[in-house]
Structure formats: C-alpha cells, structure tokens
Amino acid sequence: MANRNRNIGKWGEDLAAAYLEGKGYFILDRNVYTSYGEIDIITLQDYEDEKYLVFIEVKTRTTLEFGNPEDAITRQKQEHLLAAIETYLQNNPDLDHPWRVDVIAIQKLSAELPADIQHFESVFS
C-alpha cells in the first residue's frame, strides 16, 4: 500500500509541476528534504514586476474516503512545512524574495475522467 501511495503522490507532483509550468512558474526545486519534512515543489513566479518564491504542497487523492486532498493539510503539517521553509531559506540566503505557500489539490476519482486540479494560493504563512 505504501508503494502505491508513493506512486500516486509522485504522479500528482509531476502533474502539479506541469500545471505550474503551464501557468508560467519556474520550478527551482522538487522534493526538498529537511529535518522538518519535505517541501514538494519550490517555484519562482513573476508577479507585477517582482519575483515571488512559492512553496507548493501537493495533495493527491484517488478516493474521497479520507476527504478532499486539501483537508490533509493539518495544523501539524502547516507547522512542519513552515519550519522546513525556514530551514530552506536559511540555507539559500541568495533567494531573498517575498514568499508564500500554495496548495495544489488533485483528485483522480475515475480512470475515465481527467484529474481535477485546484490551486489554492497563499494558504498560510
């Protein structure tokens, strides 16, 4: 089961990365591991003549048994992600840009239907 979940997660992250690139985001890094946990995708976005670092958490579901993908962003997950981001920023002082955290929620509930992608911007800081 863990291997299946890992494969679904990787598929969702690949789909999210392609979606972001299609929206003009530049992918800086993927699957960045810190002692506080993983940052799925790190991007740069040009917005109103300024560059923003965008840290993306991707959640993918193939069933609604455990709720919508975005429901998996618990308070504990937020705290771990913020600590991981802080570590990343300390280790990359050259990336001195404003930043935010986005969530991409992907649902693929049927093989016959395309995946549903929802992009939630600035979900917490």
Image (cartoon, rainbow, N blue to C red):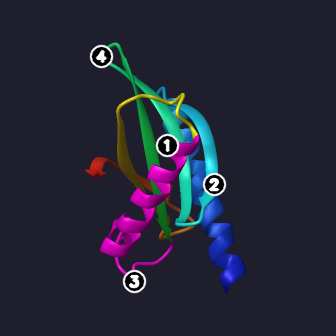
Q: Is residue 92 visible?
A: yes
In the rendering, at what x and y percent does residue 61 appear? Answer: 48, 71
Of the image marks 4 and 1, the number of the one nearer the N terminus: 4
Write down the residue under mark 4.
48
In the rendering, at what x and y percent does residue 120 appear? Answer: 31, 50
* Picture disc at residue 66: 3
User: Which kind of residue does numbered mark 2 sit on?
Assistant: Asn
Instruction: Please tell me whether mark 4 or mark 1 is closer to you in this view.
Output: 1
Q: Circle 2 sits in a helix, a strand or a loop, which is it? A: strand
Write down the residue under mark 2.
31
In the rendering, at what x and y percent does residue 69 appear? Answer: 40, 68
Instruction: Please tell me whether mark 1 or mark 2 is closer to you in this view.
Output: 1
Dominant SS type (magenta): helix
Q: CA distance from mark 4 to mark 3?
A: 38 Å
Write down the residue under mark 1.
89
Q: CA distance from mark 2 to mark 4?
A: 28 Å
Q: CA distance from mark 3 to mark 1?
A: 32 Å
Q: In front here: 86 or 100? A: 86
User: Which kind of residue does numbered mark 1 sit on?
Assistant: Leu
Left or right? Give the position of 3 relative to 23. Answer: right
Q: Using a 10 Å C-alpha cutoff, classify the residue at mark 1 as few (fewer than 14 neighbours), some (14 to 19) or many (20 or more).
A: some
Of the image marks 3 and 1, the number of the one nearer the N terminus: 3
Q: Which residues are magenta?
A: 62-91
Question: Residue drawn 46% across and 78% down?
Answer: 63
Q: CA distance from mark 3 to mark 2?
A: 24 Å
Q: Circle 4 sits in a helix, a strand or a loop, which is it? A: loop
